[in-house]
Each structure stands twice: as structure tokens, then as C-alpha cells.
Amino acid sequence: MAKKMIKILVLLAALSFMYLPIGILAVYSFTDSTTIGAIRGLSLDNYITLFTTPELRDMIVGTFALALLSAIIATFLGTLGAIGSFYSKRVVKNTMNSINNIPIVNADVVTGFSICVLLIIVVGMNKDTFIPLVIGHVTLCAPFVYTSVIPKLKQMDNSLYEAALDLGASSTKALTKVVIPQIIPGIISGFMLAITLSLDDYFITTYTKPASFDTVSTYVVNATRGSQTSIKTALWALSTIIFVLVIIFVIVMNITAGKSEEE
């Protein structure tokens, strides 16, 4: 009984450590307070400011557009890489796995600076374009898609692919009709993870973005250094909305996964 109580207390402490700060921020987003510490009257001004200020609205739209585009490209490349690696010989497979792990364990600041040096300084690409930024985010996200798809390929019944080839299907048709439908959960997980990583990234974005463009992460850092109180408090509302969307997504994914297992 005592051990069970200790485990429960440790679990509650860990959950409090992770989610209590977010909960406090969410509460203050519905108040007139300009600083954390004293709750004033309830208000939706922060949410109104968030969606009516052109600067904030453009930043949010640009951030999600970048995340969606980067995630689509990263999912395509990561999935193809995982499939190619899975059906390759052992030496090639091990080499691909090792190469894929490098961007994952490498610091984002190193990746961002390297891409900046290569594309902007060495190649001479114009930083005012979004190409370096998109390449940087794809480089960040694609390895995680790869690691999400590989386990699903290992769980797949590989005899079905071979049977499709024996029955006269081309390799492309067998891939699209047999392999990909079986690894869809891994592809979706990798896609959503790619979106999350792109939304959250700061260092790669800082080194590769055009000067006039900001994502949520870079904007928040710059806003906290400024003196516009209304902008700072509106970001509390933005953080709350993102957190609620993540919770909804996790619940939906768990329900969907549960139904799939039952079937």
C-alpha cells in the first residue's frame, strides 16, 4: 500500500511539474493581468487581440503554412527512405539507419548554422527566399518520419508484397496497394510529428528565415524582449490554443488507435 501511494505521489508530482505551468498560463490568458502574479478581472481581450492584430494573424498563418509544407515534403522523403532502407541489403540498411540518426542527435543550432553556411554563403542562395527555411525544416523533420515508418515496416507481413509480385503486380503497384496501406499509421504519426517539430523549431528557423518572416517560436522570443504588453499577453492565449489542440489531437489518435486494435 505504501509503495503504491509513493508511486501515485511521484506520478502526480511529475504531471504537476509538466502541466501546472501551462495550466497557470491558460488561466491568466482569460484575465486582464499584464504579468503573472495577480489575477485581475476575467476577459477575452487576449484572444481578441490574437485574432484581430494583423501582425499576429500573419505570423500564425505563416507558421502553420510552413509546418504543413515542410511536413508534407518530409513525410514523402522519410517514407521513401524508410521503404528503400527496409528492402535494401544489410550493409545499406545499417548505413541508412546510422546516417538517419545523425540529424536526430545533432543539435538544432548546428544543423541550422550548417544549412545557412551551405546554401546562403557557399551556394549564394538569396536568404529572402523561403527555400533555405523549408530545406532546414525538412532536414529536421524527415529523420523522425523515417523512424516512425520503420517499425511499421517491420511489423508488416512481407509475404503479402511478395505474393503481389508473384501474381503479376508491378513493384510500384505492389508498393502502393500492399505496402503503403499497411504502414499508414506510421506515416500519419511521422507527419504529425513533423508538424510539431516544425512549429516548435527556433534555431534552424532563426538561421534560415527571411528577415521579414517570423514563426511562433521566433516571434515569441522577440516579443518577450519588447515592451508591447498586449502582444505578450496575447501570446498566452496562443499558447493555450496550441496546447488544447494538441490534447484534442492526442485524444482522437488514441481513440482511433483503440478502434483499429479492436477491429
Image: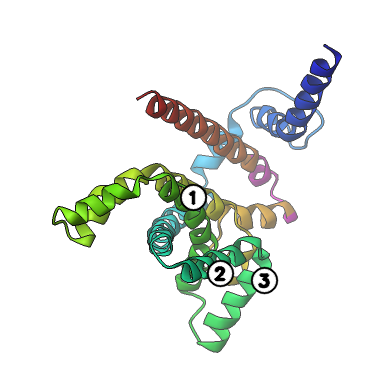
Q: Residue at x 51, y 33 (%)?
A: 250
- Element under disc 3: helix
- Could you tell me how far apart the alpha carbons at marks 2 and 1 are, in whole angstroms? 15 Å
Span shown in magenta: 225-233
Which residue occupies the foreground of this view, 27 or 191?
191
Q: Which residue is mark 2?
A: 99
* Sooner in the amino-acid sequence: mark 3 or mark 1: 3
Does residue 188 lie above or below 5 as drawn? below
**In the image, 244: left or right of 158?**
right
Q: Is residue 39 visible?
A: no
Quarter of the picture holding the N terminus? top right
Q: Residue at x 56, y 71 (%)?
A: 208
Per the picture, the main secondary structure of the magenta-coloured stretch is: helix
Q: Is residue 248 visible?
A: yes
Q: Residues within 10 Å of mark 2 (few under 14, many from 20)?
A: few
Tell me the kind of residue under disc 2.
Ile
Does residue 8 lie above or below 207 as drawn? above
- Element under disc 2: helix
- Element under disc 1: helix
* Sooner in the amino-acid sequence: mark 2 or mark 1: 2
Are the two marked residues, 2 and 3, in contact with CB atoms closer than 8 angstroms?
A: no
Mark seen at residue 110 = 3
